[in-house]
Amino acid sequence: MAKGPPALVTARVLEWARTTLGLSQDEASRKLKVSVERLAQWEHGDATPTVAQLRKLAHIYKRPLPVFFLPEPPDDPRPPKDYRQLPENLSRALSPRLRFEIRRAQLRQSVAADLSDVEGARVLPSLGSASLDENVTALSQRIRDELGVSLGEQASWRNPDKALSAWILAFEEQGILVFHASQVDVNEMRGMSFHDRRAPAILLNGSDSPNGRIFTLFHELSHLLLADPGICDLYDLREGRSTTNRVERYCNRFAAAFLVPAEAIRNHPIVASHDRSAEWRDDELMGIRRYFSVSTEVVFRRLVDVQRASWSDYLLRRESFLAGAEEYRTADARRKIVVPWERRVIKANGRRFTRLVLAAYDDEGITGSDLSEYLSVDLRYLPKIEGELYRPRRSEGSLA
């Protein structure tokens, strides 16, 4: 029998904390290293965990310790609309890690919405809105003008990490929060959006390649413009008449039209000089890809759109595109690059949100405990975070 003082927690809250993370009793008991029977007794109020056990349970369930002493389970925000079109061999249920990342993103958005009223932040209306009937080419040009990033500037970046950091900066300057999730399979989620006029937010999958995240960033932006946010995997849907399919196709088309304008790819030297009867070589696609800072797959899709390749050609090469992307992610994960902890904190929370929270703390609008919860940091590391946040941005590309 476990020894130590009992934690007088609410049984219903224990069950709520487990189920909202998507854990079964078997899974939770294995992580807690207690029997399923003992866990069931706690959740039915027939027994009580010790304080030490509760601390471990709070860590596993990713909930603040005081929550477990509430008389009733608190209300959690509703999960985003699910736009994913997962392969048949994958479950549609959200993994515990993704549930946690969604919950954390919703908390940060709620905090930012409250703080933005004080900070006078710019909000989404500066970018306007969109409808499914709007021409994506016209919309992409309007948004490019609002973001203030010319195609020439985009082409000058070349490096995918630099391009991703530059696009995120442009979004944040418009008042859009950009977060990064970690330890989430790219096959489960590429990105998601959370609509709020005071603090619109986008969550990217940090496990994805920089080029993949760039496309996701604009895909999710179109969800915000449509005021129809959700969780996405960005599978290419050409068929299907459901509203979900129509929205996802529109968002994919907008992202492609923005990042690779039709006229620009037609006039690209490689495309202009390419023999229309010849197959596209990998080195040719790579050259176009580097110019626009997008994936090879996006380049080929745009070649289909401007009638320089066929849909059947795309389908024949799509498996190789997907395999190449997976190979890149695997190789990237194996690289022994040590990213300073403070940089990882800023990447996860986004520069805009981090600045909002630090400003509120300096103005005594929030407590140290609040700051620690919102950024998921210990206050003793605050000087390093501030030093990283306000340093010159010349090498920030590696942050992505």
Image (cartoon, helix red, strand yellow):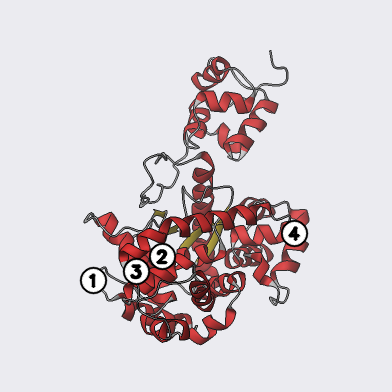
Label 1: how many residues lie within 10 Å, few (<14), some (14-19) or many (20+)?
few
Q: Where does the image place residue 121, in percent across and percent down from the top left?
A: 51, 73
Q: Nearer the viewer, mark 1 or mark 3?
A: 3
Q: Where does the image place residue 163, in percent across and percent down from the top left?
A: 57, 74
For marks 1 and 2, give the CA distance: 16 Å
Q: Earlier in the sequence, mark 3 or mark 4?
A: 3
Q: Secondary structure at mark 2?
A: helix
- Tag shown at residue 277: none
- Tag shown at residue 340: 4
Height in image: 160 above or below 61? below
Q: Secondary structure at mark 1?
A: loop
For marks 1 and 3, give the CA distance: 12 Å
Q: Earlier in the sequence, mark 2 or mark 4?
A: 2
Label 4: how many residues lie within 10 Å, few (<14), some (14-19) or many (20+)?
few
Q: Residue at x 35, y 79 (%)?
A: 276
For marks 3 and 4, give the CA distance: 37 Å
Q: Where does the image place residue 171, in percent across and percent down from the top left?
A: 50, 72
For marks 3 and 2, give the CA distance: 8 Å
Q: Which residue is mark 2?
A: 219
Kindly check if marks 1 and 2 are in contact, taking CB atoms under 8 A apart as contact: no
Name which residue type carries label 3.
Arg
Name which residue type carries label 1.
Asp
Q: Which residue is mark 3?
A: 253
The one nearer the camera, 274 or 374, is 274
Q: Which residue is mark 1?
A: 133
Is 37 placed left or right of 307 in the picture? right
Q: Secondary structure at mark 3?
A: helix
Kindly check if marks 3 and 2 are in contact, taking CB atoms under 8 A apart as contact: no
Kindly check if marks 3 and 4 are in contact, taking CB atoms under 8 A apart as contact: no
Q: Secondary structure at mark 4?
A: loop
For marks 4 and 1, give the CA distance: 45 Å
